[in-house]
């Protein structure tokens, strides 16, 4: 077996560039057999997604990436294998989505106060669907010539995590996101821990004490393998996952451009481990 899977992908339902059909077609050509679409604060239409996956011979697992707040900063929690059409969970995700819209409006207002003249209509027009987020603000800043490079938007001058105009997710604690995923029958994973800023250590990335706290409150695993993780990030979080007996996940966090299958960079014994917990979830 190739153990070809990808547990972190985005579509036009959030900040990706491809439709489900386009994404699944591309991944099928790349030989991906199992995947989860984890759009931001959006679960999509499970029946439609399942039908498209079946068409391409892909085993699909329900997924979502929830924006939350933990230890003074923004943290993303990935949910896998939750029940489709769970009314309580869908209501929670809907509330997260509405909060996302209000958050973007507040960031735009703060930018306006700094004489950065953009509007919510301009920002929302940069998304093919109802999703809005910081990437849409970045696109508007770039298109209007206010920045010379897309990534410049995420600096302290505009909407970086330490910028005046940055607005963190509302006080939806990561523990709350974990709790809601678990109540819907899913598994909760910490997304890309290496990219966060720790307030408790000189090291970049989430501290072991914070991860331990999340585990004590239901966290099932860590996304150890991620494109933005350095070799040392991967080694560190692999060791933390083993020490805390947390499951390991892998994800490309694909949004647009050339797709690079991250599973090809993962040792076969680790891929087998991931396949075990994934195979215990319900496929759709």
Image (cartoon, rainbow, N blue to C red):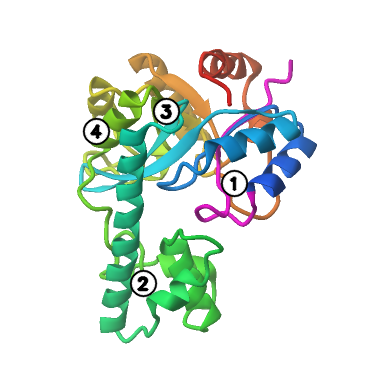
Q: CA distance from mark 3 to mark 2?
A: 30 Å
Q: Which residue is mark 4?
A: 175
The quarter of the picture where the N terminus appears is top right
Q: Relative to 53, is 251 on the left or the right?
A: left
In which quarter of the view is residue 185 placed? top left
- In front here: 73 or 139? 139
Disc 3 or 1, which lies upstream in sequence? 3
Image point 49% across, 65% down: which residue? 151
Which residue sits at x=29%, y=63%? 102
Q: Which residues are magenta?
A: 1-19
Residue 254, label in figure: 1
54 displayed left or right of 206:
right
Rendering coords of residue 176 (x, y %): 24, 35
Q: Quadrant of residue 70?
A: top left
* Mark drawn on residue 158: 2
- The reply, left or right, for residue 115 in relation to residue 52 is left
- Quick check: marks 3 and 1 in contact, CB under 8 Å? no
Q: Mark 3 to mark 4: distance in Å?
A: 14 Å
């Amino acid at each position: 077996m190739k153990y070809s899977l990808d547990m972190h992908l985005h579509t036009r339902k959030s900040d990706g560039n491809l439709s489900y059909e386009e994404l699944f077609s591309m991944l099928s050509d790349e030989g991906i057999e199992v995947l989860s679409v984890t759009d931001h604060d959006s679960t999509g239409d499970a029946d439609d997604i399942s039908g498209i996956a079946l068409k391409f011979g892909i085993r699909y697992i329900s997924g979502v990436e929830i924006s939350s707040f933990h230890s003074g900063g923004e943290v993303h929690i990935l949910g896998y294998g939750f029940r489709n059409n769970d009314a309580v969970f869908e209501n929670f995700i809907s509330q997260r989505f509405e909060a996302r819209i209000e958050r973007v409006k507040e960031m735009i207002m703060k930018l306006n106060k700094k004489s950065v003249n953009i509007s919510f209509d301009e920002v929302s027009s940069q998304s093919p669907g109802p999703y809005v987020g910081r990437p849409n603000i970045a696109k508007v800043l770039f298109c209007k010539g206010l920045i010379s490079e897309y990534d410049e938007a995420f600096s302290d001058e505009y909407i970086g995590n330490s910028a005046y105009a940055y607005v963190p997710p509302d006080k939806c604690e990561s523990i709350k996101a974990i709790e809601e995923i678990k109540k819907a029958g899913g598994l909760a994973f910490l997304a890309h821990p290496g990219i966060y800023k720790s307030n408790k250590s000189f090291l970049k990335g989430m501290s072991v004490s914070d991860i331990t706290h999340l585990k004590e409150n239901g966290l099932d695993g860590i996304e150890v393998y991620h494109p933005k993780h350095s070799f040392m990030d991967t080694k560190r979080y692999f060791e933390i996952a083993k020490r805390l007996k947390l499951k390991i996940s892998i994800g490309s966090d694909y949004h647009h451009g050339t797709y690079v299958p991250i599973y090809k960079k993962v040792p076969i014994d680790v891929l087998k481990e991931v396949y075990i917990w994934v195979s215990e979830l319900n496929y759709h």
